């Protein structure tokens, strides 16, 4: 199928789309799946305070994944003046100076000026951690900037390699919060030796040497297992909230003696108090089937809007969805009270419910 390299802007005031960054020949090559880790985000230049959209990686038309990193902007200027600019362009499309090419990872904006890339699968479909931090110090007009990726070494005291995990920015502390995920031996579809993680980690990225610390709480879900493919947000700048995703279920024994495990979607909502992370608490079971890989945003600190995802009924050999997508009617609002203790939830078009 054809891949594209065009970029578009939607003016929400006029409801008009505009094709941008069409001038000049320096631009990302045609690609797809460059948004499958969250899509990058908007970073602010620390010196000039200008904002840029950043993208990382993707599947190229030639059939391989790269780790190219591109900026588009500056966004404050007229969109007709936007341009693409590559970060650390030396070393080819799979440079060792940039984080490992990957998919099924997360990309999380920390604060205003840092992008964190974490986890996923490499080109051999092996789980990795291989975290990288991109800090936008200053973007110079002619690409003479000294912006570089900071590649973090995997630590024996840190999380094990994983994919399909959740990662969010805890604005109060500036840290990244990592939850759950899955590690599979062999291919992404292999069900033998499946491990779904139940741990929660904090990455302090503001220190000169970023460090991991593990929270004491262990997630014990409905099926007495961990959780992967879940959407996560932080409410009231304190409570880590997860919704949907799936847990491990035991299956049949294979010919080689391994127990073949599967994943079951869970339509529920949990929270962990990050200031007192002793135990997870389940607040809701939803009225409808749950979803894998939904997205979520926080509105006014206390409301989590959950939308999108798929039901895992139609996936390819990499467990990527080919159908079974959530409809707009499945969008869900979940709200906590001022103390973060009570929860109300309602689907799109329904009257608010309460449990």
Image (cartoon, rainbow, N blue to C red):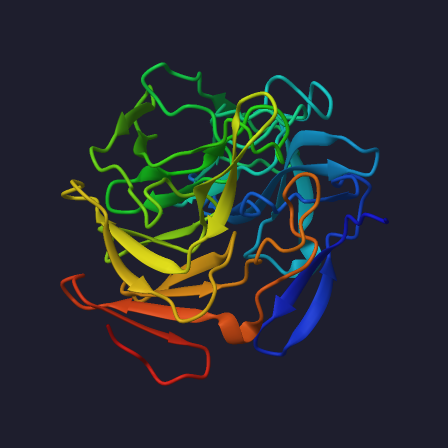
Q: In which quarter of the image is the C terminus?
A: bottom left
Residue at (44% x, 49% y) in the render: 230
* Left or right position of 44 against 64: left
Residue 11 position in % (x across, y down): 61, 71
* Left or right position of 27 against 281: right
Q: Quadrant of residue 165?
A: top left
* Left or right position of 33 against 275: right
Residue at (81% x, 47% y) in the render: 3
Residue 17 position (above or below residue 174): below
Residue 136 position in % (x across, y down): 48, 36
Residue at (33% x, 19% y) in the render: 209
Work out whether residue 103 or residue 313 is closer to the camera in this orientation and state it.
313
Residue 99 position in % (x across, y down): 56, 25
Residue 24 position in % (x across, y down): 80, 44
Tell me how many marks there are: 0
Q: In which quarter of the image is residue 299?
A: bottom left
Residue 4 position (above or below residue 130): below
Work out whether residue 282 or residue 272 is closer to the camera in this orientation and state it.
282
Work out whether residue 123 or residue 190 is closer to the camera in this orientation and state it.
190
Would residue 320 be visible to someone looking at this image? yes
Would residue 118 be visible to someone looking at this image? no
Residue at (23% x, 47% y) in the render: 280
């Amino acid at each position: 199928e054809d891949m594209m390299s065009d970029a578009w802007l939607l003016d929400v005031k006029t409801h008009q789309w505009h094709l941008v960054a069409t001038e000049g020949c320096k631009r990302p090559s045609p690609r797809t799946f460059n948004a499958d880790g969250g899509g990058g985000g908007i970073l602010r230049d620390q010196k000039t305070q200008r904002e840029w959209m950043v993208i990382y990686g993707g599947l190229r038309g030639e059939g391989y994944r790269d780790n190219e990193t591109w900026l588009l902007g500056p966004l404050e200027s007229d969109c007709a003046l936007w341009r693409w600019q590559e970060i650390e362009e030396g070393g080819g499309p799979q440079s060792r100076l940039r984080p490992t090419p990957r998919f099924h990872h997360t990309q999380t904006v920390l604060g205003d000026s840092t992008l964190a890339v974490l986890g996923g699968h490499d080109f051999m479909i092996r789980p990795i951690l291989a975290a990288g931090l991109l800090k936008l110090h200053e973007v110079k007009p002619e690409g003479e900037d000294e912006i570089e990726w900071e590649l973090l070494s995997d630590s024996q005291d840190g999380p094990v390699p994983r994919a399909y995990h959740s990662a969010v920015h805890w604005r109060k502390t500036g840290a990244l919060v990592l939850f759950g995920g899955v590690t599979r031996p062999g291919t992404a579809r292999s069900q033998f030796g499946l491990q779904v993680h139940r741990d929660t980690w904090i990455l302090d990225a503001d220190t000169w040497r970023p460090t991991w610390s593990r929270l004491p709480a262990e997630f014990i879900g409905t099926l007495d297992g961990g959780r992967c493919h879940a959407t996560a947000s932080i409410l009231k700048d304190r409570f880590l909230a997860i919704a949907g995703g799936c847990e491990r279920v035991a299956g049949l024994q294979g010919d080689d003696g391994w127990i073949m495990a599967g994943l079951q979607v869970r339509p529920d909502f949990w929270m962990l108090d990050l200031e007192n992370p002793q135990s997870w608490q389940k607040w809701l079971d939803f009225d409808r089937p749950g979803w894998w890989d939904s997205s979520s945003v926080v509105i006014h600190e206390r409301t989590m809007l959950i939308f999108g995802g798929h039901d895992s009924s139609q996936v390819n050999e990499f467990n990527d969805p080919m159908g079974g997508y959530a409809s707009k009617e499945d969008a869900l609002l979940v709200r906590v009270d001022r103390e973060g203790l009570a929860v109300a939830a309602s689907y799109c078009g329904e009257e608010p419910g309460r449990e």
